Image: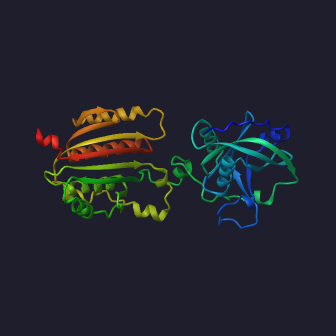
Amino acid sequence: MIRQIERAPFDDNAREVLMHAESCWLEVRPEDRRNSCSEKLGETSYYRCPEILLQDDVLYLGLAAEKCPAGSLMTQALWFGKTVSIVARGADKVLRIRLHADWCHISGGMFKKLLEHARAAGHSEDLAVVWETSFVSEEELPELPKGAYQQGVITLFEMHYDNPELIRNEMPMEKVLGCRFSLAPMSDDFIDIILSSIAKVDTSRVWSMTDELSTVYRGRRIHVLDALKACLLYSYRSGVHMTMNATISEGCPGDAAMDEEHQNAVWNESDTRINEEEMKDIRFPAVLKFALYPMGRENYLEPIGVIIQHARDRGILERTQFYATVLKGDIHELFSYLEWVCAYGEEHLGHYVVELSAAVNLPEEEEA
């Protein structure tokens, strides 16, 4: 159901203050707070909105975090029709302005506009969300509330991967690559095949975790793909039909925002593929179905065309079809191509996802 929004125009007093205000503060009262241990009970807190924009009787408020009491307050206001208050200081007066929360933007043109303006203004934090609000009422205050002078109320603000502050802090140019995969051998011995293969892989240069559904490797591209390839090769049994389904992601914001301790556990500076020597002589043909998903790009078809052409140039392109590209060849050649795709994605795409399925010992090939 879409709620019809009836907006009242901002009065001249509120409009004058907002036109001169560089930012404003969202007021969170004790009765507004929900499960917050970061603030003292009984006190009103003020969360700075680093970006505001008044346009066509809509006030856009940019917040640096969604998961905070201010974000919870705005969500409750949106869903339950409550009002919220901001405090804004103009050239010569301070107002408390009551607002309706009408809409939430986490992407799109308006979100991008305010995010770019915040970065141009030199704000260290990014915008996590932009709230669209409308006018209810205003009252003049003698001065800015004391709590509004406190900076850094939101201490765990969210940052996008391309935030200039991350670049200035000399984050590694090479990003964390993550892979979640599952093996499916069509054999009565499937349990032994899966578990013995996972156990045989040397994972000392990646972060790894196996649960009842799948296995995850995370780290540098060279080591994650080395471990993924090893697991598939070690699981190969002559005459046993088997598939591997995997999701690969590089440039994920969650990986960029890792704390230092976690990143050290994932990152290994060695350039030696630790599993390569033991698996280099294991060879067999395979069929690989994959799809590349460039994230955050309008012209996403261009890089997809580049990687398909590269497969054609290598002589491993079997066919293109709806939602996937099919490759055939020696398993080492297919993984060499996969590593090239990931290197291309790291250099040209920033954040991308690859979905792939590898199959060996296909029944139709045996019949042929």
| Displayed quadrant of residue 272 | bottom left
Q: Is residue 39 above or below residue 305?
A: below
Residue displayed at 74% across by 50% down: 84
Residue displayed at 41% across by 64% down: 265
Task: Name the residue nearer the viewer: 356 or 262.
Answer: 356
Left or right side of 197 for 181: right
| Displayed quadrant of residue 157 | bottom right
Q: Position of residue 363 (x, y in %)?
A: 16, 44
Q: Position of residue 176 (x, y in %)?
A: 41, 53
Structure colour scheme: rainbow
State the quadrant of the C terminus.
Answer: top left
Left or right side of 110 for 363: left
Q: Position of residue 19 (x, y in %)?
A: 78, 39
Instruction: Answer yes or no: is residue 127 visible.
Output: no
Q: Position of residue 192 (x, y in %)?
A: 22, 63
Instruction: Answer yes or no: is residue 255 visible.
Output: yes
Residue displayed at 80% across by 47% down: 97
Left or right side of 175 for 10: right
Task: Name the residue nearer the viewer: 228 or 4.
Answer: 4
Residue displayed at 73% across by 47% down: 23
State the quadrant of the N terminus.
Answer: top right
> Which residue extends farthest front?
1
Left or right side of 212 for 32: right
